[in-house]
Image (tube, rainbow, N blue to C red):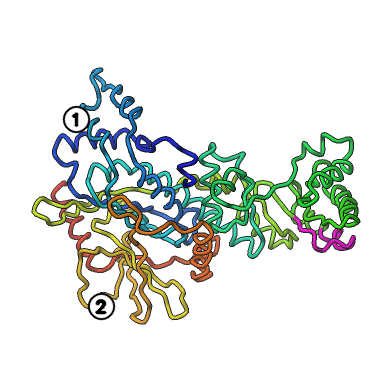
Amino acid sequence: MSAIRELYRSSFATLTDLYELTMGSGYLTTGLADRRAVFVLSFRSLPFGGGYAVAAGLDDALEILENLRFEHQEIDHLRGLRGVTGKPLFPQEFLECLAELHFTCDVDAIPEGTVVFANEPLVRVSGPLLQAQLVESVLLTVIGFQTLIATKAARVVEAATGGSILEFGLRRAQGPDGALSAARAAYIGGVSATSNVLAGRLYGIPVRGTHAHSWVQVFDSEQSAFNAYADAQPDNVTLLVDTYDSLTGVARAIETGKRLRARGRTLDAIRLDSGDLAYLSIEARRMLDEAGFPETKIVASNDLDEHLIESLREQGARIDIWGVGTKLDTAFDQPALGAVYKLTAVLETDGSWRFPVKLSEQTAKISTPGILGVRRFRDGDGRARADMIYDETIPPVGPRDEIVDPADVLHMRTIDRAWIPEELVLPALRRGRRVAPAPTLDDVRDRARDQVASLHPAIRRLLNPHVYPVGLEMGLHERRTAQVLEGRRTHA
């Protein structure tokens, strides 16, 4: 059984916003429920002021879609809903339709662990309009949140430049699901382990942890607390040294380390959780080395994020392992990705496609119509150089080497013909069933590491990153522009 099915044994069918169901009922009433349509999930701007994002959450999303069913208790609940007049909100015909529903859409998606950018189709759902509409909210919450956290984790890992990151955010996350999803996504983004034991069991993520201040406070002295913990956990000795005075705590940890060494054991690490982490870690490293414990690691925690980690490193901090919790699991400085799910194509009764466009006074909110894919171009060294968003229904005319920024039509980029193209949006489900076994979480994590490494360092930097080129294929740009102009004339 997959992790998400073990955790949530009930159906996800009603994990949706009400308007998706009311529209679904309307589609059935108007005879549109089975009309083939295409929806695309994307996001409009990169999170955290960064230069890239890391796609995550797809495996959980596909698991939900494959097993999408309306169970009898859900139908009963919907039957009891009432409109403003007190009459049933949903007709019996619609409820019977839901009771027999099986997800049969095709889903194409960018694989988890792939570096992605604004306006690119992370997920494309194609199939009966009713079904494709109903899964909007569950896809947005699963893909949006995990992509956000995986991206934050990748930034933290980048800041640590070789130091290990431990995910410590369970107690500060937005509920149990937030904690589990965050642990999974953070591992994709590159953290080494989690403190969340359930996440470790469900997802196979390594678990790490130490003791709390309360352990020290239970004993009559810090030294006796350290010695007792070493006796209780001789193969997992990381001592939290700041309950009273950090450097005094380090000295006492060294004494416990000597006891361990006499028994053939090791003082694995000490942990600093408050104070001037740069100064304290430098002094702690000196004390440990002088006492003959160069192998003992220094762990730091205390509201860390990528910016504080970068600052501490610049100050010469001697920290080997970083425990990052609140600001990782909650995406503290940007708690939502802002993902959107837009209708981009409808199959007409004559067999032709119609490509509706959503207009807006805000350029960023104008949709890109079409059956969209993404082609990434790499140079001979494997470095990602540019992404082209294109429509599968528009045949290429000549080399079509230019891409156009969807937010700025004056910003164009020429694709070097020597660059090697790579298709990113790949088949994931066909008629609601997976086309291939799910990759392991470690495989996804490795992919994310390699993908981030393929970006130029200027794109990876935390502040004011270089903008990676992403644009519409020229034929798609021209059709979109024509539709926007026509739409504005028609609806003015």
Nearest to the eye among marks 2 and 1: give it: 1
SS label for mark 1: helix
Label 1 crowd bin: few (<14), some (14–19), many (20+), radius 10 Å = few
- Label 2 – label 1 distance at C-alpha: 52 Å
Left or right placement of residue 359 versus residue 215 in this view: left
Which residue occupies 10% across, 50% down?
349
Left or right placement of residue 39 versus residue 491 in this view: right
Identify the amino acid type marked 1. Answer: Glu
**What is the span of residues highlighted in magenta in the rendered image?**
285-298
The answer to the question of whether label 2 and label 1 lie on touching residues, with beta carbons closer than 8 A, is: no
Is residue 289 in the magenta section?
Answer: yes
Q: Nearer the viewer, residue 5 or 461?
A: 5
Q: Nearer the viewer, residue 190 or 429?
A: 429
Left or right placement of residue 370 versus residue 15 in this view: left
Which residue occupies 74% across, 63% down?
316
Q: Identify the disc placed on residue 399.
A: 2
Q: Identify the disc placed on residue 93.
A: 1
